Structure formats: structure tokens, C-alpha cells
Image: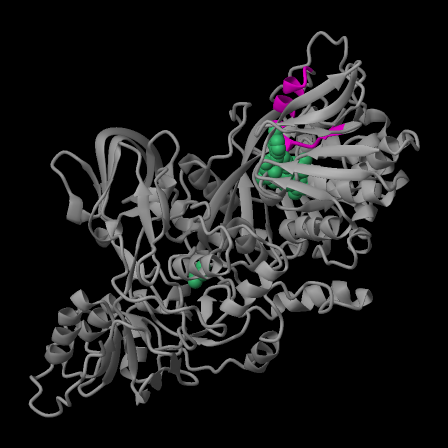
Amino acid sequence: MRSVIVGAGIAGLALAVELRRHGVEATVVEARYPGAGNSSRNVGRVRRMQLTPDLTEFSCRASDKWTRVDEITGGRNPLLYPTRYVWVLYGEDEREVVEPMQPMWDEHDARARVVEPSEVLSAVPVLQGGQRPVGGVIGDAAIVHHDAAVYAYYLFAREAGVRFEIGVRATGVEVTGGHVSGVVLADGRTLPADAVVNAAGGRSGEFARACGVEIPNSPIRREVLVTEPSKPFMTPAVTFYRPQEGWFNQTLRGELVAGVVDVDEPFGMNEESSVKFLGRTARVVLEKAPRLAELRVIRQWAGVYDTTPDKRPLVGEHSELPGLFALNGWSGRGILLAPLSAELLAREIAGLGRDPLLRSFDPNRFAGRDSTVTAHSDYYSGYAH
Amino acid sequence: MCYVITNNDGGFPAPVNPKLPATVASEAIRSDAPALSSSFRLRRPRGPMCAKGYCSQCEIVGPDGRALACQVAAHAAPPPTQRDLLRPLGLIAAFFPPWFYERRFLRPRRLRRLSLHVLRHLSSAGPLAAQAPAVRPRRYEEVEVEVAVVGAAAAEPGAFVVDPDSGDVPLGVYPGRTLGVLRGDRLIAVRFERLVLATGSYERLPPIPGNDLPGVVGIQAAETYAGSGALRRGLRVAAWAPREQRRRIESLATSHGLRLVWMDDRAPRAIRGRRRVRAIVTDRGRIPCDLFVVGVRQPALELALQAGATASLTTDGLPILALDDTPPWLEVRGEAAATTSGVPDVPAACDAMACLCEDVRVSDLKACVAQGFHQAELVKRRTGAMTGPCQGKLCSATVLATLRELGVDAAPTRARPLARPVTLGELAADA
Ligand SMILES: Cc1cc2nc3c(=O)[nH]c(=O)nc-3n(C[C@H](O)[C@H](O)[C@H](O)COP(=O)(O)OP(=O)(O)OC[C@H]3O[C@@H](n4cnc5c(N)ncnc54)[C@H](O)[C@@H]3O)c2cc1C
Ligand code: FES
């Protein structure tokens, strides 16, 4: 059994390592360098609670999986930093959405609680003096150092005999008798393969199209800024959705990373930073946490969320083209979801059957639907069903 | 090649009257205690280097929170006198590669959670101020101009001129021919047809041991400190500079009564001292000195690179990053367009500091490459080199030149905005 994985992000690398555990040959094709995509552009949050039962169940298992990544990668340390997620509520309407979630979270051991404003302020003292929250959700979470994690997988994959084709783009697949038989590279070579996995991140839609398969996976830009380090002043990962989605936290190194989204951000591949983002993020974050004002921003960058209409990933084989597998569509949660998804997909590729945990991630679930556009939506309406 | 220094004791002209305001940094130099801060990992003493606020090596905790000593008026804050109590930890850290979190260090696993929490607190970075500074969001504006210019030296009539020396802050060049600028109470996205950059240059540090010691300063910095009366008569100065900079250094020495004890275009073997520069070691032996002036320059290319220009390491003499190609609508002038360092090459010494901000030594780069990281982008993320507060201004040339010596693809890494650090308070805008 030979497999070729397109994309050396966290998903492709994790899958390569998992496939080797089943004795499947694996080659990873990467157009730029390992981690060049969103796996080095994100903020590495791993949280248990989600807004739906299926995603909450999966996320709890996926969070547990993260605590085993060091073993899986031969004792390398992905710098998984256990902390709490503090989801700060500024609108009464938000409380109405999250309060009914409590029993569901308890059932799945999501370790999350809806809390009063005073508890939010004591969990995140830098919010004091800022806009007053109406409440919050505090849950168990971890922050992983994305580069440490990517390199743990990358170094171990090489040790485990995974082959790498770095600096060359995959341009499509070769099909023989209705089944995928290889991957075509931009330099003209074809790598023979019984299974080809599309783990191309923001370019997954593009690569699928090049293989003749339409998948509803649209990239949308997400920007980040980072400040110079300072002594630890907060441990949790903070997120809010009013007046618009934004988040910030302090890294292990002491830097503040932050981002506030543009509600009118258009869909499309865009890894470029903008001026507007700086002004918007600084203003909105300081409205919430005014003490951060003296931190000096040293750099900004952008990545994309590869987003599906129902905000769930595509994990599994395309029925239209046997031998072509999807491992993408993370909708902003690939760091959290990829290691466990990779483990389960590797079992599937190795012929051990499909795990029921993957039931809502079927890549063929949109077939026959009238509309598969990914629409702009408020977080609560977009992610709650 | 070595320039023989005559003993010019006696007959000094009177020191020029200080013209520039004294800063915490200039006071530190004047009082012979240039160590102002502690480096991030190895906790090595660090002091003012550029005097212009881009090297970020002189960060102190001032009266209004963290500040760069070279930008704070001397009377506003006393120079920090505290010794770094955690310095011994730095000596231990020196035995670990920069990715010290790998395997061994954080074993056993049970302790990992604890050790991550503890490690965070060992950082030498300053604390957050207890009081929130007042912030008034700026107005966000988009303007369209024919020509945008960065650097007053290249000002053209009718152009939108961004002059960092008079308070404008260029943030970066963005796609769609856009320049981000802070000016007055506005955050401006300037759309231009043509861009002219006269962004000047930075210190190109020699790749030798001791290159990060307090007392290693750039030539502009030495002039600035002299101008604020910080360089006392008789101060012993060693200068490493290309030939065409010698006059400049000599005239600085004569006008301020400095003793030029050594000047050459070939870098010495090492700079010595514990908490500050005490001497240099050359082929001819040890030469005591108080200040090591760097006259070798690295063009300031980040805005040009963001605009889509390409650059590579030069091949004659000590490598610097120099422009190869620029888009047709971009023009780079002055020191930023320099194409040679003008000094002979010296191989990077293992215990030289490659990246000061992140405490990455040449030996760490070698270890990283030996581990199989064969692209500059990977080495950058793996070691943190070029990602510190100066964003590679002081170190890109050294890091990339070292990588090239090791046979690694040394194309410059992606240059991202911001061109220099700006506080969140200054950036906030109604965008
Ligand atoms: C700002 C931001 C913050 C985020 N925060 C979080 C978070 O807190 N928690 C979380 O769980 N997730 C987060 N994410 C999402 C997460 O980063 C992604 O879901 C995850 O990195 C996806 O990994 P991947 O391996 O699928 O894709 P990528 O890392 O994007 O990797 C895809 C790789 O494929 C390569 N490639 C593409 N096309 C081809 C081709 N044709 N041939 C060869 N190679 C190709 C690319 O060069 C790239 O290296 C965030 C994302 C962003 C942008
Ligand atoms: S010296 Fe500042 S980033 Fe390397």
C-alpha cells in the first residue's frame, strides 16, 4: 500500500506518522516547506467545548489525543501548555445561546462552565478596567506551540521512513480504471499511489478541483498580530464575539498574539496582511483589556481558515473518485482536530474500517444539495448546528 | 591593511558642546555602565547599540512602563542599576540549544506542565505596567497619491513624504501598492503609483565572539552619544569600518577628544569584557578599549522586500543582504541601495552571537542545520533567529551568511510588517 499526502501542514504530517504506524508507505508532497501554510500561522488553541454535541464529543477526544502527541513523535515535545479557555460574553443574547449548552457539555466531559462576570475578571485580570462582560464560559483547554508541534511530527516522520518531496507542487492525480493511481507533480513526475490524501489546507478546494472533484471548502483570511514579549500577565486563551469575533492570549515566550476579524472579509485565498487590521485589532482589544496598550507590536501575518458550509471538516474517501481522500475543511480548528482525525483516517486507509466518531465529517455529505456555499454568519448561528 | 594608530594624547581640541538631549542610554554610556538590560535566554548583559530605537537592545522599565533607553530623556528615569539575579540561569541555559524544550530538558513528563509554567516566568522581559495608559483611537484614512517617499532625504515635490525623523511612522508596504503610516492622529493607508525608499541602513555586526557586549555601538550611535556629551575625552575607541568611513570616525575622534586605539576594515578576532567592552583581540594581540564602533552597514531593506523586491547575500567581502531586483514602480536610494559591505569577509565564529534578540549563537544555527533544517524559513522558526523585537535588522545578514557557509539555501526569509515596533495604544484606530 502506497500513499501520497499533499501538504506538509499539521494534518499531512500527522497522517504520515499515523500511516507509518500501520505499515503504509507514505510520501508527503509540499510546495513550500513543512508548516508553510496555516500550521505556522495560527495560535494553537485546543479547546474541548464546542456548540454542538458531535463537535464537542470529537473535540474532547481530540484534546486527549494531543496529550499523546509527544509519545507518538518519539518523545518530542510539542510544547502543549495546559490552560483555560475564557470565552467572554458581552451580549445578553450570547448568554441565551450558551446557557442551554451546559448539560451537553457535562455529558461529554467538556469541562466547561458558564460563569458570572466577576469570575471572568478574576480569571483574566487584564480585562479589568475594560468593557464590562455580562458573563463567560470557562473551560479546560491547551495552547500548543505550532512550530514545535509541526517539527515534532516532521522530525519523527523522517525517522519513521516517510519520504518528502519538498519544494514541488502537486498538480493533480492520475486515474486508472476509475481509481486514483498516482499524483502528478509540477516538475512532470508522477508518484504512483493507491491512496492520495488532500491535506492542502487553504488550497484543498483548488487541489480537489484539479483532481476533478468539487468540494465545498472556501478559504477565508484570518489575520494575526504579535507583540514583543513581556513577563507573564495572563495564562488563559481569551475569545469574544461581540462586537465582532476577536481573541488574544500570551504565548509561552511572553508575546501577546491577537486578532479581530473584519466582518466583511471576502472569501478567497489571501495570505497578506493589511493596515486596517492593525487599527481595528488594537482598538477592539484595548476596549476589552486597556492595560495591554503599552505592548509593542513587532509583526503581523495572515493565514486562512479552510471553511465548509457546516463548519465541519472533510475526512474520508471521495465516493466520486475512489483512492482520493480528504483531510481538510477544518473551519479554523485544524490544530485541535487534525491529530485525532489523522489517526482515524489512517485506520480507514489501512483498511481497518471507518470510525463512528467521524460520522459527521463524511466528505460526501454535501452531494446532491442545492446550495453548498459557505456563507458569512455570526459565530453562534454559523457554528451552533 | 591595519591602520596604525598614532598616540594622539595631548593637543585635543576642546570637546564640542553637547547639542543633543541626554537620554537614559547616553547617560549609561557616559557613566561607563552601558549594560542596561539582560538578554532573553542567556541573560547576557546588553546595552544601547543603535541610538535610534530599532535595535531594541536597551529596553528598560521606565516611568511609563517599558521603554527604549535611547528614546527616554535622562531626567525622566534613573538608569536601571539592578543586577540580574537570574544571571546564573543564563549560564545554564547556555548549555541548551535554543529549542531547549526538546526532549531531554522537559523530562520527566509529570513535571512538564509545571516546568512550562515555571519557564514562562524565567523570561527576562519586562512586566506589564499596572496602570492602563490613556488611549484615543486614531482616525483611519485611505489616501491615493502619485508618489510616496519614505525618508526625507528623497523628498520630491508633490510626493507624500513619510519622514521618520519628524515623527511619521512607516508601518509597512502592503499588497495593492499600499504604504501603512502613522501620522499625527491618523492611521493612513497610502495607495501610491510609485514608491521611493531612502530608508538608510543598520549596523552589520561582526560575526565574532563578544559582538553583543554593551559598548558595541553603531557609528551613528557613537555620533549621537558624542553629541549628547556622553563620550568623555580620552575614551579609548576601537573602530571596525570600511575605508570610506574612516574620515568620519577620525573626525568624530578629533572633535570629541577620543583616543582611536584601533581601526581596521578586517574585524578583530574577538571582543572581550564581562559586562561591557574592555578590549579587542586582534592578530597582534589584545588592545584595551572602552567602545567598539561598528561602521559596517546593512542596508535597511524590509520595506523594499515587503514591496516585492528581491535581495540576496553579496559575494565580495563580508556578506550583506543587497537588493537584486525591484518592481518597476519602486526605487531605492542612498545607503539602502548599497551593494557591498566594503570590508573583507571573516568566517562566523561558533560562539559569536548570530541573533541578539533571541540569543541564538552561530553554534545553535549549526546544530539546527545538522538536525536537518535546510531552509532559512525553517531555521528561523526552529531557533527564533530573526524573529525578535528588531525583526532581524541586526542579525539577518549574519544568520543568512552563516547558513550559506553551512551550505543551506540562504534566500532571505519573508519580510513582514511592521517596519518597527509600535504600541497597541498607538495603533488603535477606528478602522
Ligand atoms: C489566524 C489563524 C488562527 C488559527 N487558530 C487556530 C487555533 O487556535 N486552533 C486550531 O485548532 N486551529 C486554528 N487555526 C486553523 C489551523 O491553523 C488550520 O486549520 C491548520 O493549520 C490546518 O492544517 P493543514 O495541515 O490542514 O493545512 P496547512 O497548514 O495550511 O498546510 C497545507 C500545506 O499544503 C501545501 N500545499 C497546498 N497546496 C499544495 C499543492 N498543490 N502541492 C503541494 N503542497 C501544497 C501548503 O504549502 C501548506 O504547507 C487557525 C488558523 C489561522 C489562519
Ligand atoms: S537580533 Fe533582533 S531579531 Fe535577531
The magenta stretch is: A196-212
Residue furthest bottom in the image:
B10
- Residue visible at 62% across and 63% down in the picture: B99
Q: Residue B426: image x %, image y %?
A: 38, 49
- Residue visible at 55% across and 23% down in the picture: A267
- Residue visible at 82% across and 66% down in the picture: B110
How many numbered markers are drawn? 0
Q: Nearer the viewer, residue B428 or A266?
A: A266
Q: Residue B36: image x %, image y %?
A: 40, 76
- Quadrant in which residue A338 is drawn: top right
In the image, residue B203 sits, relative to residue A346, either above or below, namely below
Q: Nearer the viewer, residue B252 or B191?
A: B252
Residue A230 shown left or right of residue B66 in the figure: right
Instruction: State which image quarter holds ligand 1.
Output: top right
Q: Residue A285: image x %, image y %?
A: 52, 44
- Quadrant in which residue B251 is drawn: bottom left
- Residue visible at 53% across and 63% down in the picture: B365
Residue A7 shown left or right of residue B215 in the figure: right
- The reply to whether residue A174 is visible in this rendering is yes
- Quadrant in which residue A198 is drawn: top right
In the image, residue A69 sits, relative to residue A230, either above or below, namely above
